[in-house]
Amino acid sequence: KNQVEQSPQSLIILEGKNCTLQCNYTVSPFSNLRWYKQDTGRGPVSLTIMTFSENTKSNGRYTATLDADTKQSSLHITASQLSDSASYICVVSGTGTYSGAGSYQLTFGKGTKLSVIP
Amino acid sequence: DAGVTQSPTHLIKTRGQQVTLRCSPISGHKSVSWYQQVLGQGPQFIFQYYEKEERGRGNFPDRFSARQFPNYSSELNVNALLLGDSALYLCASSLDYSGANVLTFGAGSRLTVL
């Protein structure tokens, strides 16, 4: 069964500090991995998308890494800001033929809730 | 350019009622997907439509139905509402149904069933 596990479930950090969020997946075969940021009560916003051949991708203060061998990804946030407070969701896309369960075959993690405090 | 727009943003219904949620994709996007997100959980896939045809269906009961119109907008209908249907309903659009495309989400419709 395809699964995406994220840790920690929640995290509180001081403004200006760095943090790293983890994502482990069992989706196979693998197509790509995405990180989304979701503010409370809002829709998720894409941060990065990485394919099998990419090890790292940055988007401003956000840097995602991918180890396709160990099926692990991390999202590193540098110099956190109050506006970084949100849930961060890891989403893994599988490949294969149409299975009736969605051509995307996306598997969502439950997210990590990050709170940045002054 | 306008993003993915959803309506209504909030609504309250009672058990047994029916609800229709609407979604307009980004201009040029032909695929729309619907997700249900209960508090504290990740989004759960409900439906995917591309060029007005259903391309995927998640593990939801037949009370849930959807359709896509010629202008690529979409509606999600839920009949015989249950308390457990209370959730944020997200619509996402993309160019096509390929798993390689980035999904752009709307702000969601918050449904409360009393």
Image (spheres, helix red, strand yellow):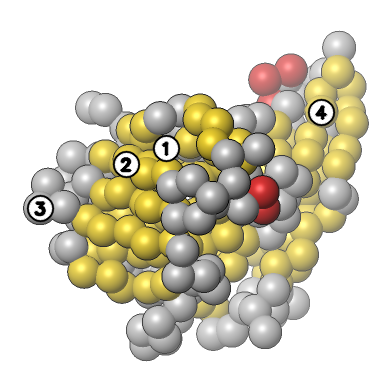
Against A51, residue A44 (above or below) is above
- Which amino acid type corresponds to the residue marked 4 in the rendered image? Ser
Q: Nearer the viewer, residue A64 or A1?
A: A1
Q: Residue at x 26, y 28 (%)?
A: B2
**Label 1 sits on residue:** B106
Label 2 or label 3, whichever comes before in sequence order: 2
Q: Position of residue B7 (x, y in %)?
A: 37, 32
Q: CA distance from mark 2 to mark 4?
A: 30 Å
Q: In the drawing, what numbered circle is on residue A115?
A: 4
Query: Label 2 vs label 3: CA separation?
Result: 13 Å
Q: Residue furthest top?
A: A118
Q: Label 3 sits on what residue type?
A: Pro
Secondary structure state at the residue bearing disc 4: strand
The answer to whether residue A62 is visible is: no
Q: Chain of mark 3?
A: B
Q: Would residue A77 be seen by someone viewing this image from the given angle?
A: yes
The mark closer to the camera, 2 or 4, is: 2
The Cα atoms of the two marked residues, 1 and 2, are separated by 8 Å
